[in-house]
Image: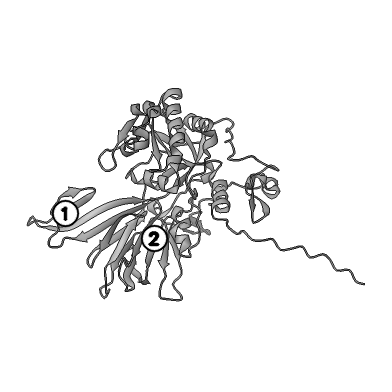
Amino acid sequence: MEEASLGVPAGPQPQPQPRELERGGGLCSRLRGRAKCRSLSASPALIASKVSRRTQSLHGPSPATKFGPKACMVQNPKAVMHIQDPASQKLTWNKPPRSILVIKKIQDDRLLQPFKELCIFLMEVKEMIVYVEKKVLEDPTIANDESFGQLKKLCTFREGFDDLSDRIDFIICLGGDGTLLYASSLFQDSVPPVMAFHLGSLGFLTPFNFDTYQSQVTQVIEGNVAITLRSRLKVKVTKENRPGHPRAVEENGLIDTRCGDGLLRKRTSHYQVLNEVVVDRGPSSYLSNVDLFLDGRLITTVQGDGVIVSTPTGSTAYAAAAGASMIHPNVPAIMITPICPHSLSFRPIVVPAGVELQIMLSPDARNTAWVSFDGRQRQEICHGDSISITTSCYPVPSICFRDPVNDWFESLAECLHWNVRKKQSYLPDMEDD
C-alpha cells in the first residue's frame, strides 16, 4: 500500500463540486414545504464571524498543564492527550496512488452501470490497478454480459482468504453506509483512505454524488482533500473452552490458547468495529443481565434488552434509535447506550476514548447473551466469557466532500431531517386602538 499521510499542503485548496445546484449561495432542500438552507457556508453569521473564529474545529486548544504559580501536572506523556485540530486534517500522498479497491453493493442492479463506468475510468484513463471482490464479478448479470468484458482485467480478492493490507492505496465505495462498514472490516490494522459515493438508501456516511465522479476522484488522487478520522473500537472476545468444541488452534481470526498440559482453555477473537458493539438477549424472553466494567471496576449491571457500545460514528446509527445523543466523529469518546432498560434512571453515557470496557454475564443471569459487531459476526456469550472494548489506534480516514463539520450537519439535515419543524408564525405588533 502506498503511504498516505495527514498534512496541510501549501497553496490554494481546490473547492469540491457540489452535489446539487446551489441556489442563493447554498444547498437548499425542501422539507415539509419550507425551504431550508443546508450549507453552513451560506450563513451570514458564519461569514461575519469567519475572521474572529479560531478554527472550525470542534475542539478547543490543548489544556495548559500549569495551574497557578506553583502547581503543575506530573510530566508523564501518557497523562496528556494531544488532539489534532480537525480543521487541519488534510490528505496528501507520499507517493502517487496506484491501486484502488472498489467496493460495490452486492445484488443491486442499479449499480452495475456506475460500477462499470468507474472501473473503466480508473483503468484506462487513470491507469490504476483496480481490485474488486471476486463474488462481484461472479454476478450472473456481469458474467453473462459481453459489454462487461473489460472488467475481466480487474484483480479480485476473497474476504477472509486474501490479505489486502499492503496492496490497496485507497478505497472507493459504491452503495450505502453498509459498504463503508464492510470496507472497514476488511482491514484489521491500518485502513487506506475511503471515498464513499451515495448510491444506497440512507447515505449518512456517503457524502459524494456520482454524477461528477471523474473530477472528484481526480481531486482525491491529486491529494489536498479534507478527511475525517473515524475512530474504531478494538474488541477482544474471550471464551472458555467447553466440551465438544473443536480444537482448532487458529481459524478465521479465532485463536486458541493452550495451557501447559496441552488442553485448550480459552479462545480469543479480535475485531475492529466502526459503528457499534451490540450485546442483546437474543431469542430468550428473559431480560438480559450483564455486568459492565470500566478499567476493571464494576460500574453497573444492565438489565433490559441489551447494551450498545458505539463510536461517535455509530452514535447516529443504532444508538440514536435507542435514545442516545449524536456525537461528531471528531470527538474522542465511547458511548454506552442501554437498550430498553428496566429502569427509569438508566440514561446513555459518554466516556473518554481510551478507557477499557469489559462486558460479562452476571453470575445470576437467567440466560446467555448474544453479541454482534457492526451487525456481523453474531455469536453467543455464556457464563465465563468476556468482551473487552477500547478505542483502536487504527481509525478509518473518510474523505470529506467539504470538511468534517459541514459534511456532518449536511447529513443530519438531509438523511435524518434533524430538527425539522414547521416554523412558528410571526406575531405582528398589536397597536393600541
Q: Which residue is mark 1?
A: 257
Q: Is residue 260 left or right of residue 159?
A: left
User: Secondary structure under badge 2?
Assistant: strand
| 3D distance between C-alphas at marks 2 and 1 | 27 Å
Position in image of residue 333 (x %, y %): 44, 56
How far across and how far down the image is residue 100, in percent? 39, 32
Query: Disc 2 marks which residue?
Result: 309
Residue at disc 1, secondary structure? strand
The kind of residue tagged 2 is: Val
**From the image, which quarter does the N terminus lie in?**
top left
Who is closer to the viewer here, 293 or 107?
107
Q: To which quarter of the image does residue 287 belong?
A: bottom left
**Which amino acid type is shown beneath numbered disc 1?**
Thr
Q: Is residue 101 visible?
A: yes
Q: Nearer the viewer, residue 226 or 181?
A: 181
Residue ID at (12%, 54%): 247
Ranked by sequence position, the earlier of labels 2 and 1 is 1
Q: Residue at x 39, y 60 (%)?
A: 309
Nearest to the observer: residue 67 or residue 56: 56
Q: Can you give x and y, in whole percent of width and height, for residue 212 in the image?
A: 54, 34
What residue do we see at 41% from left, 45% from top?
A: 179
Q: Nearer the viewer, mark 2 or mark 1?
A: 2
Residue plotted at (48% across, 43% down):
199
Q: Nearer the viewer, residue 44 or 99?
A: 99
| Mark 2 touches mark 1? (CB < 8 Å) | no
Q: Which quarter shows the C terminus?
A: bottom right
